Image (cartoon, rainbow, N blue to C red):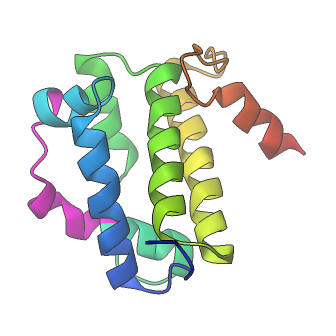
Amino acid sequence: MRATSDIGDRRDLDVLLRRFYGAAFADPLIGPFFTEVAGTDLEAHLPSIVGFWERALFRTGAYGRDAFAPHAGLHAARPLTAAHFGRWVQLWHASVDGLHRGPTAERAKAQGERIALAMLRRLAGAGADTGGTGGGFVPLAVLELRSVG
C-alpha cells in the first residue's frame, strides 16, 4: 500500500499509533521500556495516546494528563538516552511515512521530533548529549538545528 492520504481524524491516529507501537514494542533498543520497565498494556493505554496526538495535531480531544511524568518514571528506573529518543523518532517517521502523506503527516513528524528533544532535555538536563550514537539513529542534534532554523 502506498501512502497517499493525510492524517485526517482519530481513526487514522488509532491505525497509525497501533502500527508505531507494534514496531516500538518489538524494537530491541526501545521495546524493553514498554514491555519490561513500564509493562505497557497497549489496549488500555491507546485511547490516551490517541487523545494526546488528536489534541497535538487537530487541537481537539480531551487529553489532560501529564505526558512527562510517565517518562520521568521510566528514566528513573532505566535512563533514557539520545539513542533511545533517536530510535523513537526513526520509528515514528517510518510509521507516519508508511501510511500518510500531507501537511498533517509532516506536522506529526515535526511534533514528534520536538517532543523527543524536549523530553530528553527535561530528563537529562539542558546540556544533554543530543548528538546521537550512529547506527542509523536520527541524531537529535540534527533535530535541534532544524528547530533553530
Please state if 68 lies on the left or on the right of 90 as rendered: left
Q: Which residue lies furthest to the front in this view?
A: 1
Q: Nearer the viewer, residue 6 or 107?
A: 6
Q: Which of 101 and 84 is in front in this view?
A: 101
Q: Residue 43, percent across and down?
A: 11, 62
Please state if 59 lies on the left or on the right of 28 as rendered: right
Residue at the spot x=12%, y=27% of the render?
A: 36
3 in relation to 94, above or below: below
Please state if 101 lies on the left or on the right of 39 as rendered: right
Q: Nearer the viewer, residue 99 or 58?
A: 99
In the rendered image, the quadrant that contains the C terminus is top right
Q: Which residue lies furthest to the right in this view?
A: 149
Q: Quadrant of residue 135?
A: top right
Residue at the spot x=82%, y=35% of the render?
A: 145
Q: Residue 137, percent across and down?
A: 55, 26
Q: Residue 72, percent across and down?
A: 34, 31
50 in relation to 33, above or below: below
Q: Residue 143, percent across and down?
A: 71, 37
Q: Nearer the viewer, residue 66 or 19?
A: 19
Residue at the spot x=57%, y=63% of the render?
A: 108
Most common SS among magenta residues: helix
Range shown magenta = 37-49
Asked if the magenta segment contains residue 60, the reply would be no
Is any atom of residue 42 visible in this view? yes
Residue at the spot x=52%, y=41% of the render?
A: 89
Q: In which quarter of the image is residue 6?
A: bottom right
Number of callouts: 0
Q: Quadrant of residue 45?
A: bottom left
In the rendered image, the quadrant that contains the N terminus is bottom left
Is any atom of residue 64 visible in this view? no
